[in-house]
């Protein structure tokens, strides 16, 4: 059954005039930057009854990012309103916050014209504004924050970069926010096909009858009336300098299986495919950024449901490549589908680097909260590159240890591995999950991003909007295009 969705993401269209010309005269609201010296950007049309610097001083403005002062100005024989927004030190983080604050302050307006600061990373300003202006509704339940945003001045390449990153992130949010009554594994695979067609990617989808060797994906999906899928997206530029595989968890709904989640723990589980959404969305923008590396994206899609055919605690499954796994907890399903994807990548794709991304463990959220994702890696340079990409993009990572002493927790009495701590203690849950995944990477340079905390948000803040956040798209694009 189709649904009506209203994703709102205004684009930076219109003039980009480096001479500092004024915004489009029909703009409903205008935003002008100012720094810690309280001097606004040059704008010949900015005529206030009171000197602007005096107004800023009156409001005790400091020019900090996120600070917005609304002032009246004379324009075309009438009184209009202008938003003066602080830019702080002009860093990417400051401008991202500034853009988000302006867009939120303009909520309900038909149009917003933003004068871009003459210095600083304009792409971050665009990202912040466009992502804060995002909304997703089914029907007409929410007010649209801003109808259109136009950016004036600045480098056009920077503005386009910011728009492309924001649009890719919005795509991930759309996929994550779609309810699971619509979002079956087949639906998610179809969205990947559509993205591939629009973005010039090659695509392959394994359907139910073709997943014979992928024992983890089949086992997780066997309890659902919606059969599982495996999606492969491929981007190949001329003379690629490396081959990177991205693997994303695509659990379209997670009941926990027979190891059933409590009701509260199940409410947000339409978002359990956020890792897969990040992979699809990041792949969608690679051609636009002319990424210099070959990238293969794998999304392991399944619905973890309960029925008479669902896998049971104590079952032994055979992952791709032949490793056997004793399933002690059916709610630790994400690692089972990812293990198939990782083993397939190692055996068939010959990558130089493998990165997986998943809402994998509540333990990562307990350890790091909702602002940071955990990163585990077998390669120091890869870990450092991802952490740096996270800092630059505003999607921060914290490196966690692969504690070798804990590997024995995953030993099984009847199989090669258990999918959770065999003592079922719950200790070091995020580390144990990472150690499990490492077993399927073939000793290639590998990193695992556990995004269980920042993939979802309970409220709007900065450029983050309630619901799926699209976490991972920006940092992956930064890493792949550096």
Image (cartoon, helix red, strand yellow):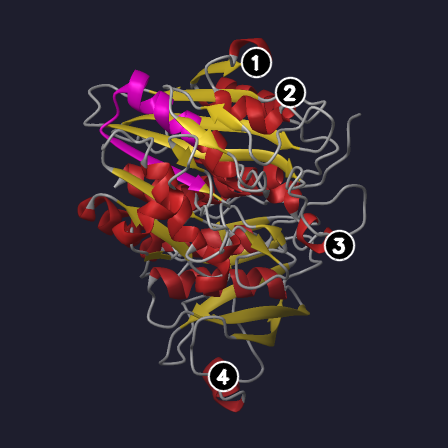
Q: Residues under labels 2 and 3: Cα distance? A: 36 Å
Identify the residue position indicated by label 2 in the image.
227
CB atoms at circles 2 and 3 under 8 Å apart? no
- Residue 356 lies within the magenta run: yes
- Look at the numbered discs 1 and 2 and tell me whether their residues touch, using CB distance below 8 Å: yes
Q: Which residues are magenta?
A: 339-357
Tag 3's secondary structure? loop
Image quadrant occupied by the C terminus? top left
Q: Position of residue 169 (x, y in %)?
A: 50, 43
Which residue does the image show at 46% across and 16% down from the upper left? 203
- Mark sitting on residue 143: 3
Which residue is nearer to you in this view: 71 or 100?
100
As helix, strand or loop, the secondary structure at mark 4 comes to helix
Residue at disc 1, secondary structure: loop
Give the mark, 1 or 3, whose residue is nearer the N terminus.
3
Mark 4 or mark 3, earlier in chain: 4
Q: Is residue 61 left or right of residue 389?
A: right
**According to the image, label 1 marks what residue?**
207
For residue 448, which quarter of the picture?
top left
Which comes before the other along the chain, label 4 or label 1?
Answer: 4
Q: Can you tell which mark lies on residue 56? A: 4
- Say above or below: 36 vs 180: below
Which quadrant holds the N terminus?
A: top right
Q: Point out the tag, 1 or 2, that comes first from the N-terminus.
A: 1
């Amino acid at each position: 059954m189709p649904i009506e969705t209203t994703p709102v993401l205004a684009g930076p269209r219109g003039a980009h005039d480096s001479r500092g010309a004024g915004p489009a005269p029909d703009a409903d609201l205008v935003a002008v930057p100012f720094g810690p010296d309280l001097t606004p950007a040059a704008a010949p049309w900015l005529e206030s009854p009171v000197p602007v610097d005096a107004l800023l001083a009156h409001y005790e403005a400091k020019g900090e990012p996120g600070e917005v002062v609304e002032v009246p100005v004379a324009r075309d024989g009438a009184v209009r309103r202008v938003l003066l927004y602080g830019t702080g030190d002009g860093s990417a983080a400051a401008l991202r916050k500034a853009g988000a604050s302006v867009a939120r302050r303009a909520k309900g307006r038909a149009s917003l014209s933003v004068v871009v600061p003459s210095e600083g990373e304009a792409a971050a300003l665009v990202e912040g504004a466009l992502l804060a202006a995002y909304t997703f509704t089914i029907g007409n339940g929410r007010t649209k924050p801003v109808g259109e945003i136009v950016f004036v001045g600045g480098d056009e390449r920077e503005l386009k970069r910011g728009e492309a990153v924001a649009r890719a992130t919005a795509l991930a949010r759309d996929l994550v926010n779609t309810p699971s009554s619509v979002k079956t594994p087949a639906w998610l695979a179809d969205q990947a096909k559509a993205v591939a067609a629009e973005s010039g990617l090659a695509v392959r989808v394994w359907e139910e009858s073709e997943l014979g060797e992928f024992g983890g994906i089949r086992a997780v999906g066997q309890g659902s009336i919606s059969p599982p899928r495996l999606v492969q997206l491929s981007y190949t530029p001329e003379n690629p300098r490396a081959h990177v595989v991205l693997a994303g968890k695509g659990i379209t709904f997670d009941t926990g299986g027979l190891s059933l989640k409590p009701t509260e723990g199940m409410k947000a589980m339409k978002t359990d495919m956020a890792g897969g959404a990040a992979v699809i969305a990041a792949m969608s923008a690679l051609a636009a950024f002319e990424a210099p590396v070959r990238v293969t994206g794998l999304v392991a899609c399944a619905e973890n449901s309960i029925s008479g055919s669902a896998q049971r605690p104590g079952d032994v499954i055979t992952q791709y490549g032949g490793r056997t796994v004793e399933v002690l907890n059916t709610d630790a399903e994400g690692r089972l589908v990812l293990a198939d994807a990782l083993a397939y990548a190692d055996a068939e794709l010959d990558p130089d680097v493998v990165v997986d991304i998943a809402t994998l463990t509540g333990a990562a959220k307990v350890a790091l909260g909702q602002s940071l994702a955990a990163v585990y890696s077998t390669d120091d340079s890869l870990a450092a590159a991802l952490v740096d990409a996270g800092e630059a993009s505003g999607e921060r990572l914290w490196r966690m240890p692969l504690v070798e002493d804990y590997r024995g927790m995953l030993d099984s009495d009847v199989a090669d591995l258990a999918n959770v701590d065999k003592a079922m203690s719950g200790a070091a849950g995020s580390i144990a999950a990472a150690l499990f995944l490492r077993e399927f990477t073939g000793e290639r340079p590998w990193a695992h991003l556990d995004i269980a905390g920042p993939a979802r948000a309970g409220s709007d803040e900065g450029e983050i909007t309630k619901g799926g956040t699209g976490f991972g798209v920006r940092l992956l694009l930064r890493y792949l295009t550096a």
